[in-house]
Amino acid sequence: MADARARESIETDAAVTLRPVDGAPTIIKIELTTQGRVAGVDEKQFQEYAEQAKANCPVSRALAGVPEVTLQASLAR
């Protein structure tokens, strides 16, 4: 069991788009790409967990004013 856990991981990259708004650099878009390797979780469950994390994590709530936040999540095979 310890060996399986050592191979489990979740990696997330964020691409942030800045544009001037009223003369100040402003985050207008965040594109999240998440890939996970999680034992006992299928693709549908992983998608649901990723969407829940996007909606409820403290950083997402802090950045709620960003007009567009996208998420592409996939489960590694």
Image (cartoon, helix red, strand yellow):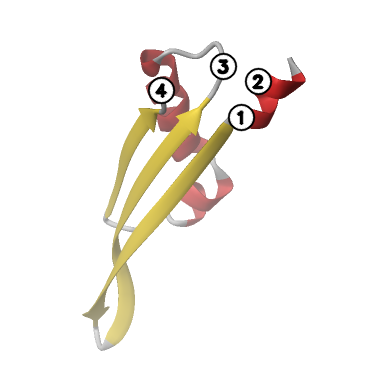
Q: Where residue 39 is drawn, which disc sits there? A: 3
Q: Where residue 7 is drawn, which disc sits there? A: 1
Q: Earlier in the sequence, mark 2 or mark 3?
A: 2
Q: Which residue lies under the disc numbered 2?
A: 4
Mark 3 Cα shell of 10 Å, populated few (<14), some (14-19), many (≥20): few
Mark 2 Cα shell of 10 Å, populated few (<14), some (14-19), many (≥20): few
**At 61% from the left edge and 29% from the top edge, which residue is drawn?**
7
Give the image quarter of residue 46: top left
Mark 4 Cα shell of 10 Å, populated few (<14), some (14-19), many (≥20): few
Instruction: Please state which amino acid type lies under the numbered disc 2.
Output: Ala
* Element on which disc 2 rests: helix
76 is higher (above) or lower (below) than 24: above
**At 71% from the left edge and 22% from the top edge, which residue is drawn?**
3
* Element on which disc 3 rests: loop
Q: Is residue 75 left or right of residue 70?
A: right
* Element on which disc 1 rests: helix
Instruction: Please state which amino acid type lies under the numbered disc 1.
Output: Arg
Query: Does residue 56 show up?
Result: yes
